[in-house]
Amino acid sequence: MTVLIKGAGVAGLTAALELTRRRIAVEVMDAAETVGTGASNYAGGMLAPYCEREAAEEAVLTLGLSSADWWAEAVPGEVSRKGTLVIAAGRDSVELDRFASRTRGYEWVGGNTIGELEPDLAGRFDRALFFPEEAHLDPRKAMAGLYKTLVEKGVRFHLGSTEPPADTAFSAVVECTGAAAIDTTPGLRGVRGEMLFLETAEISFSRPIRLLHPRHPLYIVPREDHRFMVGATMIETDDDGPITARSVMEFLNAAYAVHPAFGEARLVETGVGVRPAFADNLPQVLEQEDGFSIAGMHRHGFLLAPAMAQQLADRICAGGHEQLYAQGALQ
Ligand SMILES: Cc1cc2nc3c(=O)[nH]c(=O)nc-3n(C[C@H](O)[C@H](O)[C@H](O)COP(=O)(O)OP(=O)(O)OC[C@H]3O[C@@H](n4cnc5c(N)ncnc54)[C@H](O)[C@@H]3O)c2cc1C
């Protein structure tokens, strides 16, 4: 007997791996032809519990602290542990103090250290916050890595389908359908996140750079091949239509303020993902008639998916869903 996971985004794939590790048979289905095409495809991949604490509940920090370790084990070689650098233009310097007052896990650094950490920012900013324990990964590579591992472990994938495969009797379903669950999950709403990729060989960063600004904060996450993910808006809507001209202009202005060489960068991709979120912006493992759902990952899908997957597996192993035992999926 087997558990069916519906949705092969970060929530579904992490849940699949965690259940597999506990010797529970799993199959995964997704409406899309490949894994990781939902909001997970557009994420920055920042594993930044301390920076996120600035605007999030303490639980985001506590649940997210071991995330980088989980990912490093799940997708070896994909986690970069270089920390996060938070900067602000001189006129917005008070934003750094405000940010610092709302979290912990940082060191104040001056111009010289900024230049040592990120040589391309040398001489451009006088002070910054450095969060040495934070990490980041490339979400697309992480999703591909999880998929490969799961296939190697014998997990069957049913892609391009919304109908459960007929040849297996599933003991329980775990819904991990992201924003698609908004219409059916009370209290779940959509938060639109726009992003773009810039490509330039003129700039190298080793870690995510967050630029604080009273209206248009942004972050820049370095990827391979001279690419930089620039994001992200937080707009209260589940509209997943194309990025707006305003957002593109604001991103490009802010990126230019971080380093003028971004003015010559190529704009190689834009994207929009809808983050599913509850009122407190914390994710939940919910019990359903036929199993569970993992919902409301908001802007912390990569940071918190490991903790939610472990909660799900704990509940299933602890008999949280009696039907699983009754039907023999678990011993
Ligand atoms: C611009 C942006 C930047 C972000 N940056 C970060 C970051 O730096 N760090 C971080 O931790 N988080 C970040 N996030 C948040 C993170 O991306 C989300 O929290 C996460 O991707 C949500 O994952 P999910 O698996 O719940 O949903 P999704 O990734 O949307 O996956 C849902 C899956 O379900 C499938 N599906 C839907 N309906 C069905 C159905 N009926 N049957 C079968 N399959 C179905 C979809 O095809 C999709 O593959 C960011 C988000 C955005 C938009």
Image: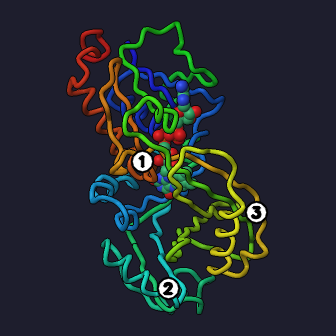
Residue 6 shown left or right of residue 30 in the figure: left
Q: Residue furthest left?
A: 318
Where does label 1 land, which residue? 73
Name the one closer to the observer, 243 or 62: 243
| Residue kind at label 1, given as amino acid type | Glu
Q: Residue at x 33, y 24 (%)?
A: 288
| Residue kind at label 2, given as amino acid type | Asp
Residue 92 - label? 2
Residue 34 shown left or right of residue 312 in the figure: right
Residue 51, given in percent of the width and then of the height, sits at 40, 67
Residue 9 in sight here: no
> In the figure, residue 247 lies in which quadrant?
bottom right
Q: Residue at x 32, y 36 (%)?
A: 285
| Residue kind at label 3, given as amino acid type | Leu
Where does label 3 land, which residue? 267
Mark 1 Cα shell of 10 Å, populated few (<14), some (14-19), many (≥20): few
